[in-house]
Image: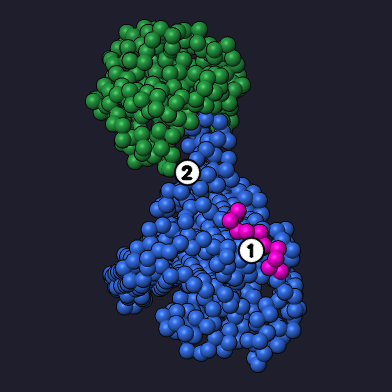
Chain colours: A blue, B green
Amino acid sequence: MMSASMPTLRAHALARFNELGVPTTKHEEWKYTSLRKLVDELDSVLDSVLVDELDDVLDSVLVDELVSELDSVNVSKDSLKTSSQTSLKTSSQTVTLFNGTYRPDLSTLIDVEGLTICELNDELVASDEKVGAAFTTAAPIDAHAFVALNTALATSGVVITVAKNATIPTPLTITCVNDAQTENVLTTPRVLVIAEEGASVQVIESHHAQGEHTAVEVGVTEIIAHANSNVTYVKLLVDVGNTHHIGFTGGHIYRDAVIRAHTFCIDGTFTRNDLELKLMEPGASAYLDGVSVLNEEQFADNHTVVDHLVPHCHSEELYKGVYDGKSTGVFNGKIFVRPQAQKTTAYQSNHSLLLSDRASVNAKPQLEIFADDVKCSHGATMGQLDEEAVFYLQARGIGRDEARALMTYAFAAEVIERLPFDDLRTYLEERVANKLGAQP
Amino acid sequence: MIIDIKDLKAGIDGTEILKGISLTVNPGEVHAIMGPNGSGKSTLASVLAGRDEYNVLGGTVEFNGHDLLDMSPEDRAREGLFLAFQYPVEIPGVSTANFLKSAVNEQRKYRGLPPLEPAAFLALMRERMKLVEMDPSFLQRSLNDGFSGGEKKRNEIFQMAMLEPKLAILDETDSGLDIDALRIVAGGVNALRNSENGMIVITHYQRLLNYIVPDFVHVLWNGRIVRSGGKELALALEEKGYDWIKQETAVA
């Protein structure tokens, strides 16, 4: 809930970021995720990029130290490549956030009944009651330092509103382009999805990089799923190159509503995803799944929180990871079942496949259950390919490398198969198969 | 001659299990290898198929004019060797149809043949499944995943029907089967028997040999073939058990 004016909120957020600081590995939630390298990059990014607008907003407040570090360099917006070449061809509707800024000129917007897409800016937050009420509820600035940073810096995001009982027939793609062609950039894409009562929408959030310089992307997405609504949210890190992505997605799920969140980390030097879904009213459901397929020195950390606040809610979670080369994965899955949340059903599983001696994974399921009449389970496995199965395939004439690729692909495909869109499924199957050297 | 095994010695973890096996299989022949538990029957199957935890300690195996022991497991299969597993492996996420498509097309590629057209391939699968009375719905299911013991063994014979090997080694394919499943599996095997191919049928029980009638029976004991004969040898074993042979061997 927004009561303070935007500049004040931004100032608070920036102050909060300064207070919290960039987390170190001493912080429980960042234990396996070292930001040391990133901090160096971030410093240089902050040095070279300035967010002019912020100056005005912040002049009165306690952020002098940070502001003084920021040089007055304008982001060059003439060097844009159009985002079309990197965007997915899976949907007719494409919203582009270019270096965190909503760009209708780079978006493909078609009139669809019940769907409203507009810039998320200070003015809208102040003037639109629904937007104002929703903004920063599912991603409060206290959530973690980077949510605060995003809130402080993001001035031109996008808000997607789906009207009561409207069903949006085709998925909507939000393309977040990180353009580091001419210099290092810090981008802060901000998305707010509001599904009104009974609404149904599918949102694909796809992150892209271009250019040889470093992009640090600190993104926040909030999803408010009102009663009986149905939101599918797909987060794609498939074409992010050397972008350092730190993204937070928060969802509030009301009575009988459903959020299905699918997260794919198929590319990226450094990725940290936080996904927090709160089951706010009885009958709410959350489905979370994701797969990371990493090699070389790639790093991906998925932190998820499913918070059962009330009775009769359901959650199901499946995260998988394939780690080759010197890659590293982290999975931390928290499930809270609050004292009043009786009749909760909550299931979580996490499976990791290590293809190389030098790859590693840290997995931590964490169930905190304070109600007594619930069904909850979790399971985690970590291992290598089953050599007996590899031999079985070889004994039928399939080469050893192909056999390993086939089995690895099958392991990852279990998550891809859950996607409800054929085009996107095919696209991901091809990308994963290519990365693994398998036939889809 | 399909396969010529000469004085094969092999073991695992430094223990010699096969202590000099010689066996020749010609086209059109079915050889049964019987023996008590621990005699080396499954080791023989594993060594021939190329399972790498076994070490070959001596002897030669010529298969189709090639040095079998020098080949990878996949190349042995591509040359026409097929092992029906005693314990078929469950592979979640890989459908039976996709698996067979990969296997058949890899083998065709090795032989310089183009891949089969999908429609023709599907028709072929449906036809060959009938041999072992498998329902077509199995094609879309993950390989052996959740299959019953009998379904897994029928699936092995179905794969054999698809791959049309020159030499099939059936490793205790009858173990754990009830009489109906045994009859179906044996019926499939018999339908695939012809004058061009050969089979080595490894079994602990004579019962299977009522259904798959062998040309030769060999008794394996303590890593050696201690007696060979015709199908009547299996009957004698059924009647008298293995002790009789063990004693004779010990005396000799």
Say which element carries label 1: strand
Chain for mark 1? A
Residue A184 left/right relative to A231? right
Residue A367 left/right relative to A8? left
Foreground residue among B7 and A143: A143
Mark pair 2, 1: CA separation: 32 Å
Against A352, is B172 above or below?
above
The amino acid type found where label 2 is placed reads Ala
Q: Which residue is mark 1?
A: A178
- Residue B46 image point, x, y percent: 49, 26
Against A342, is A95 above or below?
above
- Residue B109 image point, x, y percent: 54, 23
Q: For the point 52% across and 26% down, which residue is it?
A: B106
In terms of secondary structure, what is the magenta stretch mainly? loop
Quarter of the rendering containing residue A195:
bottom left
How many C-alpha atoms fall within 10 Å of the one at disc 2: few (<14), some, or many (≥20)?
many
Foreground residue among A127 and B132: A127
The boundaries of the magenta stretch are A76-86
Query: Which label's residue is closer to the chain start, 2 or 1?
Result: 1
Q: For the point 70% across and 66% down, which residue is it?
A: A78
Q: Which residue is mark 2?
A: A410
The amino acid type found where label 1 is placed reads Asn
Q: For the point 40% across and 33% down, which residue is it?
A: B97
Q: Is residue A334 magenta?
A: no
Q: Which mark is residue A292?
A: none
Whether residue B15 is visible: no
Residue B168 left/right relative to A67? left
